[in-house]
Amino acid sequence: MASLLYGAGLWLMECVRLRVKDIDFGYAQITVRDGKGNKVRVTMLPGALREKLEEHLGRVKALHQKDLIPLPFHSYNFVAFLARSSPTYHGMSRRSLVGFAFYF
């Protein structure tokens, strides 16, 4: 992150707010939104960081794809957890339990 700040001339909050769609590897540029003065500007993507950023985005994409795989429902026992953690669980009806699970 520090090398991106220095190499692209970004302010700290500009770097923190970067999104994947703001980085254009084809044109080697970074689009900075909501920067100083609420203006959109374009700055260069340093050549030394290009490979590192592509590797990082590849790892993040793989992690995201892994997170999208649904877990089996039986991977945790929600009712047992709720019974341990909530002292008022025993007085709940089945209908309120469904509502509780939906909101949390």
Image (tube, rainbow, N blue to C red):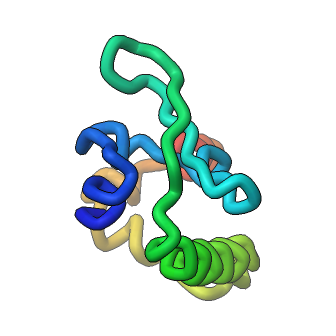
In this orientation, does residue 97 appear? no
In the depicted structure, whether residue 93 falls above or below residue 54: above
Q: In this orientation, which residue lies closer to the viewer: 48 or 5? A: 48
Q: At 31% across and 51% down in the image, what residue appears?
A: 88
| Near-viewer residue (2 or 103) | 2
* Outermost residue to the top: 37
Residue depicted at x 56% and y 38%: 31
Query: Viewed as shown, does residue 33 lie left or right of 13?
Result: right
Give the x, y percent position of residue 25. 68, 61
Q: Nearer the viewer, residue 36 or 61?
A: 36
Question: Quadrant of residue 87 in the image?
Answer: bottom left
From the viewer's perspective, tell me whether residue 50 is left or right of residue 25. left
- Seen at 34% across and 59% down, the residue is 7
The x, y position of residue 49, in whole percent, is 46, 72
**Location of residue 93 in the rendering, given as x and y in whole percent from the top left corner:** 55, 48
Q: Residue 34, image x and y in percent?
A: 43, 23
